[in-house]
Image: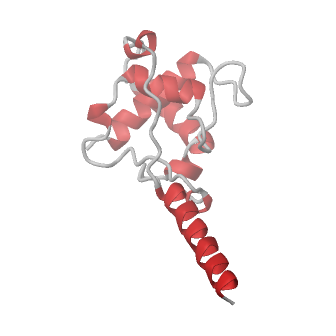
Amino acid sequence: MKTRSIAAIAASIGLLMGGVALAEEHKTPVAPQSYLDMKNPLKDTKAVVENGGKIYEKKCKKCHGEKGDGKGSAAGTLDIKPVAFSAPGFLKGKSDGQLFFITDKGSPDTDMDDFGPGSSSNLSADDMWSVIAYIRKTFTK
């Protein structure tokens, strides 16, 4: 009887610890210096921002949300929630190169896929820069 109780307690602790591991905050990888040094080469003209908005609508909104709040239609099913671009100060703390790196390469152990050349999305560098211009113009707080 005691053996079953001990086994049940051990199993419960294992489940709790697994839940704690899932709840730990994901650490977004820091881009290599070559990316961190990058600046968006595109000016945030109306055409660039509109192009970025169209791509965001197709590729980003389902997770990051229409309002950039990380509450898109697919976000609820993800273990690691998408970042909220609209969170006050979030974008001020991120360089263009860091945003480009994550868009290009994705974020390991999350549902944030790579979107750069050669990926299944195969976005060009200009398209990724357009999305970054859109995100900054639309969601900076």
Indicate left or right for 124 with 40 as reference: right
Indicate left or right for 45 with 141 as reference: right
The x and y percentages for residue 138 are 36, 41
Colour option used: secondary structure
Residue 11 sits in which quadrant? bottom right
Q: Residue furthest front?
A: 2
Q: Residue furthest bottom?
A: 1
Is any part of residue 78 visible from this angle? Answer: yes
Q: 37 or 123: nearer the eye? A: 37
Instruction: Point out the image quarter for the C terminus.
Output: top left
Q: Is residue 24 above or below residue 138?
A: below
Q: Is residue 68 above or below residue 40?
A: below
Indicate left or right for 111 with 46 as reference: right
The x and y percentages for residue 12 are 59, 75
The x and y percentages for residue 106 are 58, 31
Q: Looking at the image, which residue is at 64% across and 86% down?
A: 2
Q: Looking at the image, which residue is at 48% across and 52% down?
A: 66
Indicate left or right for 129 with 123 as reference: left
Q: 29 or 15: nearer the eye? A: 15
Q: Looking at the image, which residue is at 56% across and 17% down?
A: 125
Q: Looking at the image, which residue is at 63% across and 29% down?
A: 115
Give the tally of numbered discs: 0
Instruction: Point out the image quarter for the N terminus.
Output: bottom right
Q: Is residue 24 above or below residue 116?
A: below
Is any part of residue 71 visible from this angle? Answer: no
